[in-house]
Amino acid sequence: MIEDQDKKPDGKEGIIDTGMLNDPGNLKSCIESILFISGEAVKVDDMARTLELPASRIREAVNMLEQEYISKNRGFVLRKVAKGYRFYSNPAFNEILQKFVKTNIRVHISQAALETLAIIAYLQPITRTGIAEIRGVRADSVVLTLVDKGLVKDAGRLKEPGNPILYRTTERFLELLGLDSLKDLPPLKDFKKNEEQ
């Protein structure tokens, strides 16, 4: 972490051509490049450290990019998720994209994995036994699959006989769902209302 987010670290000789980045257009292009090559949300502090610039300048450029994509109705938007920023498709085209996904892209997560992921997301941290009690079947292999996909991780051990592993969702989970934090999950009561209708 940068100790003072708005100051360059002292005593470091710059390896980035900061003169080039003084131009707002170049800085925005550089940030876009970083976001495009990253497979996950990128934090402002990480970009600031890499570009050897104050976090306030990066934040300002990111805010400008967000507004530009919205005002120009681009096919993608920049969203704050998992405490960082990532590109997503423009929600205005959701209907078309859903049609495309249904006809051209296979979903790589089983129904059992989806159910298990939902249980972990809402009840975390939770053990495999806790998941099995809710689902009515063992969850060992499904949980391991979710760990392999980077959606779930070990969150320590429960202090009880056997010390079972507790599981929780990862930042990757938040990114894939387009959430900034678990507080953004829809309330469980909304699902109950749908079931009653």
Image: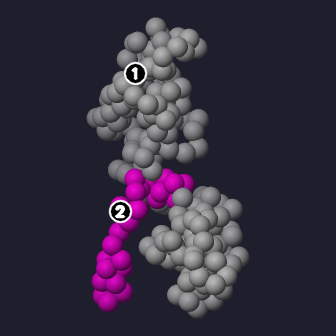
Residue holding disc 1: 7
Does residue 137 sit above or below 4 in this rendering? below
Between disc 2 and disc 1, the foreground one is: 1
Badge 1, how many Cα within 10 Å: few under 14, some, many 20+?
A: some
Nearer to the camera, 131 or 101: 131
| Residue at (56, 89) in percent of width and height | 133
Percent position (x, y) of residue 81? 42, 49
Tag 2: amino acid: Lys
Does residue 141 sit above or below 101 in this rendering? below
Residue holding disc 2: 183
Percent position (x, y) of residue 116? 56, 76
| Residue at (69, 62) in percent of width and height | 148
Does residue 105 sit above or below 165 in this rendering? above
Q: Secondary structure at mark 2?
A: helix
Percent position (x, y) of residue 99? 49, 60
Tag 1: amino acid: Lys
Q: Which residues are magenta?
A: 171-197
**Residue with the most extreme top position:** 19
Percent position (x, y) of residue 2? 46, 31
Is the residue under label 1 in contact with that under label 2 (CB below 8 Å)? Answer: no
Q: Quadrant of the C terminus?
A: bottom left
